[in-house]
Protein backbone atom coordinates (compact mmCIF):
# COMPACT_ATOMS: atom_id res chain seq x y z
CA UNK A 1 0.00 0.00 0.00
CA UNK A 2 1.12 3.53 -0.77
CA UNK A 3 2.49 5.54 2.14
CA UNK A 4 0.88 8.81 0.97
CA UNK A 5 -2.55 8.63 -0.65
CA UNK A 6 -4.70 11.33 -2.19
CA UNK A 7 -8.39 11.33 -3.02
CA UNK A 8 -9.84 11.88 -5.49
CA UNK A 9 -7.23 11.22 -8.16
CA UNK A 10 -9.16 13.18 -10.75
CA UNK A 11 -11.90 15.76 -10.33
CA UNK A 12 -13.91 17.95 -12.64
CA UNK A 13 -15.89 20.76 -11.07
CA UNK A 14 -17.60 23.98 -12.05
CA UNK A 15 -16.69 27.55 -11.25
CA UNK A 16 -18.00 28.59 -7.85
CA UNK A 17 -18.23 25.10 -6.38
CA UNK A 18 -16.58 24.15 -3.11
CA UNK A 19 -14.36 21.10 -3.27
CA UNK A 20 -12.07 19.26 -0.92
CA UNK A 21 -8.97 17.28 -1.72
CA UNK A 22 -7.84 14.80 0.88
CA UNK A 23 -4.46 13.43 1.83
CA UNK A 24 -3.67 10.55 4.16
CA UNK A 25 -0.31 9.11 5.17
CA UNK A 26 0.88 6.03 6.99
CA UNK A 27 4.50 7.15 7.30
CA UNK A 28 3.98 8.58 10.78
CA UNK A 29 5.38 11.95 9.72
CA UNK A 30 4.41 15.11 11.55
CA UNK A 31 4.95 17.48 8.65
CA UNK A 32 2.58 17.68 5.70
CA UNK A 33 2.41 19.96 2.68
CA UNK A 34 0.16 20.87 -0.22
CA UNK A 35 1.62 21.91 -3.59
CA UNK A 36 0.18 22.69 -6.98
CA UNK A 37 1.94 21.98 -10.23
CA UNK A 38 1.32 23.95 -13.39
CA UNK A 39 3.05 23.31 -16.71
CA UNK A 40 6.29 25.26 -16.93
CA UNK A 41 6.09 26.51 -13.33
CA UNK A 42 7.32 23.59 -11.28
CA UNK A 43 5.68 23.00 -7.91
CA UNK A 44 4.51 25.83 -5.67
CA UNK A 45 3.72 25.53 -1.97
CA UNK A 46 0.13 26.29 -0.96
CA UNK A 47 0.03 25.41 2.76
CA UNK A 48 2.10 23.40 5.19
CA UNK A 49 1.57 21.96 8.66
CA UNK A 50 4.16 20.86 11.20
CA UNK A 51 1.62 19.27 13.52
CA UNK A 52 -2.12 19.20 14.12
CA UNK A 53 -2.12 22.64 15.73
CA UNK A 54 0.34 24.30 13.38
CA UNK A 55 -0.86 25.52 9.96
CA UNK A 56 1.11 27.93 7.79
CA UNK A 57 0.52 29.69 4.51
CA UNK A 58 2.81 28.96 1.65
CA UNK A 59 3.66 30.89 -1.48
CA UNK A 60 0.18 30.82 -3.07
CA UNK A 61 -2.46 30.34 -0.36
CA UNK A 62 -5.09 32.79 -1.66
CA UNK A 63 -8.29 30.97 -2.59
CA UNK A 64 -7.36 27.88 -0.59
CA UNK A 65 -7.85 26.67 2.97
CA UNK A 66 -6.65 23.59 4.81
CA UNK A 67 -7.57 21.39 7.72
CA UNK A 68 -5.28 19.06 9.67
CA UNK A 69 -7.76 16.62 11.15
CA UNK A 70 -5.13 14.29 12.60
CA UNK A 71 -1.44 13.60 12.28
CA UNK A 72 -2.20 11.40 9.30
CA UNK A 73 -4.73 13.58 7.48
CA UNK A 74 -4.40 16.94 5.77
CA UNK A 75 -7.18 18.32 3.55
CA UNK A 76 -7.11 21.14 1.03
CA UNK A 77 -10.28 23.06 0.21
CA UNK A 78 -11.15 25.37 -2.61
CA UNK A 79 -13.99 27.46 -1.19
CA UNK A 80 -15.16 28.77 -4.56
CA UNK A 81 -13.28 27.14 -7.40
CA UNK A 82 -12.14 29.23 -10.37
CA UNK A 83 -10.69 28.08 -13.71
CA UNK A 84 -7.14 29.20 -12.94
CA UNK A 85 -7.10 26.70 -10.09
CA UNK A 86 -7.01 23.96 -12.69
CA UNK A 87 -3.78 22.15 -11.89
CA UNK A 88 -2.19 19.01 -10.53
CA UNK A 89 -2.18 19.01 -6.72
CA UNK A 90 0.32 17.09 -4.64
CA UNK A 91 0.40 16.30 -0.96
CA UNK A 92 3.77 15.59 0.67
CA UNK A 93 5.08 14.55 4.08
CA UNK A 94 8.43 14.81 5.84
CA UNK A 95 10.08 13.67 9.04
CA UNK A 96 12.13 16.32 10.86
CA UNK A 97 14.18 13.60 12.51
CA UNK A 98 15.12 11.99 9.22
CA UNK A 99 18.88 12.07 9.85
CA UNK A 100 18.85 15.72 8.84
CA UNK A 101 17.82 14.91 5.28
CA UNK A 102 14.17 15.93 5.78
CA UNK A 103 13.20 14.49 2.43
CA UNK A 104 9.63 15.19 1.36
CA UNK A 105 7.64 12.21 0.11
CA UNK A 106 4.91 12.92 -2.39
CA UNK A 107 1.49 11.42 -2.96
CA UNK A 108 0.25 10.38 -6.41
CA UNK A 109 -1.43 13.71 -7.11
CA UNK A 110 -4.96 14.92 -7.81
CA UNK A 111 -5.71 16.30 -11.24
CA UNK A 112 -8.31 19.07 -10.93
CA UNK A 113 -10.20 20.69 -13.78
CA UNK A 114 -12.36 23.72 -13.06
CA UNK A 115 -14.79 24.55 -15.86
CA UNK B 1 12.65 35.94 -2.36
CA UNK B 2 14.34 32.69 -3.26
CA UNK B 3 14.54 31.92 -6.94
CA UNK B 4 15.57 28.57 -8.36
CA UNK B 5 16.49 28.29 -12.02
CA UNK B 6 17.13 25.13 -13.96
CA UNK B 7 18.59 24.77 -17.38
CA UNK B 8 18.02 23.52 -19.85
CA UNK B 9 14.24 23.28 -19.65
CA UNK B 10 14.16 20.64 -22.36
CA UNK B 11 16.89 18.21 -23.24
CA UNK B 12 16.88 15.59 -25.93
CA UNK B 13 19.89 13.34 -26.03
CA UNK B 14 21.00 10.12 -27.58
CA UNK B 15 21.55 6.95 -25.64
CA UNK B 16 25.11 6.53 -24.53
CA UNK B 17 25.86 10.24 -24.30
CA UNK B 18 26.73 12.29 -21.22
CA UNK B 19 25.03 15.50 -20.18
CA UNK B 20 24.56 17.84 -17.23
CA UNK B 21 21.52 19.64 -15.85
CA UNK B 22 22.18 22.82 -13.89
CA UNK B 23 20.34 24.27 -10.92
CA UNK B 24 21.12 27.79 -9.72
CA UNK B 25 19.55 29.36 -6.65
CA UNK B 26 19.56 32.90 -5.37
CA UNK B 27 19.98 32.74 -1.57
CA UNK B 28 21.82 30.72 1.02
CA UNK B 29 20.51 27.20 1.42
CA UNK B 30 21.23 24.42 3.86
CA UNK B 31 19.99 21.60 1.66
CA UNK B 32 19.15 20.86 -1.94
CA UNK B 33 17.08 18.04 -3.39
CA UNK B 34 16.77 16.38 -6.76
CA UNK B 35 13.51 14.70 -7.73
CA UNK B 36 12.41 12.71 -10.75
CA UNK B 37 8.89 12.78 -12.19
CA UNK B 38 7.65 10.38 -14.86
CA UNK B 39 4.74 11.57 -17.04
CA UNK B 40 1.49 11.53 -15.09
CA UNK B 41 3.24 10.29 -11.97
CA UNK B 42 4.33 11.63 -8.63
CA UNK B 43 7.77 12.90 -7.63
CA UNK B 44 10.44 10.45 -6.56
CA UNK B 45 13.32 11.60 -4.40
CA UNK B 46 16.74 11.02 -5.97
CA UNK B 47 19.31 12.91 -3.88
CA UNK B 48 19.66 15.14 -0.86
CA UNK B 49 22.75 17.35 -0.75
CA UNK B 50 23.56 18.89 2.59
CA UNK B 51 26.93 20.57 2.39
CA UNK B 52 29.35 22.33 0.12
CA UNK B 53 31.19 19.88 -2.09
CA UNK B 54 28.66 17.11 -1.48
CA UNK B 55 28.54 14.54 -4.25
CA UNK B 56 26.12 11.65 -4.48
CA UNK B 57 25.82 8.97 -7.12
CA UNK B 58 23.17 6.43 -7.96
CA UNK B 59 23.64 4.39 -11.08
CA UNK B 60 24.12 6.70 -14.06
CA UNK B 61 23.15 9.83 -12.12
CA UNK B 62 25.52 11.93 -10.06
CA UNK B 63 24.58 15.10 -8.19
CA UNK B 64 26.90 17.71 -6.73
CA UNK B 65 26.53 20.90 -4.73
CA UNK B 66 28.63 24.08 -4.65
CA UNK B 67 27.09 26.30 -2.00
CA UNK B 68 29.50 29.16 -2.68
CA UNK B 69 28.41 29.33 -6.31
CA UNK B 70 24.81 28.44 -5.32
CA UNK B 71 24.89 25.78 -7.98
CA UNK B 72 23.98 22.12 -8.14
CA UNK B 73 24.49 19.83 -11.09
CA UNK B 74 22.90 16.54 -12.06
CA UNK B 75 25.20 14.64 -14.37
CA UNK B 76 23.95 11.81 -16.56
CA UNK B 77 26.48 9.27 -17.72
CA UNK B 78 25.92 7.04 -20.76
CA UNK B 79 22.21 7.81 -20.88
CA UNK B 80 19.67 5.04 -21.33
CA UNK B 81 16.01 5.31 -22.32
CA UNK B 82 14.79 4.56 -18.78
CA UNK B 83 16.18 7.89 -17.64
CA UNK B 84 13.64 9.80 -19.72
CA UNK B 85 11.67 11.90 -17.21
CA UNK B 86 11.38 15.41 -15.83
CA UNK B 87 13.98 16.28 -13.21
CA UNK B 88 13.42 18.94 -10.57
CA UNK B 89 15.79 20.53 -8.14
CA UNK B 90 14.34 22.02 -4.96
CA UNK B 91 15.99 24.25 -2.40
CA UNK B 92 15.25 24.56 1.30
CA UNK B 93 16.39 28.04 2.21
CA UNK B 94 14.54 28.46 5.48
CA UNK B 95 16.60 26.57 8.00
CA UNK B 96 14.53 23.99 9.82
CA UNK B 97 11.26 24.77 8.06
CA UNK B 98 11.62 22.53 5.00
CA UNK B 99 9.84 25.05 2.80
CA UNK B 100 10.97 23.95 -0.61
CA UNK B 101 11.23 26.17 -3.64
CA UNK B 102 11.27 24.13 -6.83
CA UNK B 103 12.92 24.81 -10.13
CA UNK B 104 10.75 24.66 -13.24
CA UNK B 105 12.08 21.23 -14.16
CA UNK B 106 14.14 19.78 -17.00
CA UNK B 107 12.28 17.47 -19.32
CA UNK B 108 14.79 14.88 -20.45
CA UNK B 109 14.13 12.66 -23.46
CA UNK B 110 16.58 9.91 -24.31
CA UNK B 111 16.52 8.92 -27.95
CA UNK B 112 17.55 5.38 -28.91
Image: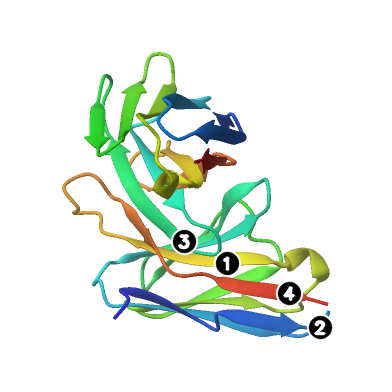
For marks 3 and 4, give the CA distance. Answer: 23 Å
For marks 4 and 2, give the CA distance. Answer: 8 Å
The residue pinned by badge 1 equals A89
The dot on residue A14 is 2
* Residue ranking furthest to the left: A99
For marks 1 and 3, give the CA distance. Answer: 13 Å
At 30% from the left and 31% from the top, the residue drawn is: B62
- Percent coordinates x, y for residue A103 in the rendering: 31, 51
The residue pinned by badge 4 equals A113
Q: Is residue B5 left or right of residue B62?
A: right
Kindly state the secondary structure of the residue where label 1 is placed: strand
Can residue B28 be seen here? no
At 55% from the left and 64% from the top, the residue drawn is: B40
Q: Quadrant of residue A115?
A: bottom right
Can residue B43 be seen here? yes
Q: Earlier in the sequence, mark 2 or mark 3?
A: 2
For marks 2 and 1, give the CA distance. Answer: 17 Å
Q: As rendered, which of A38 and B86 lies closer to the eye?
A: B86
Amino acid sequence: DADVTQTPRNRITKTGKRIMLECSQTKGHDRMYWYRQDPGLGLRLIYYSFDVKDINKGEISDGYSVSRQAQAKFSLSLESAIPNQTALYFCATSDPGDRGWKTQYFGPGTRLLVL
Amino acid sequence: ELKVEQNPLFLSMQEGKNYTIYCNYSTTSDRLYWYRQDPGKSLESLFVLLSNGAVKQEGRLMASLDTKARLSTLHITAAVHDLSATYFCAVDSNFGNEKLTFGTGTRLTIIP
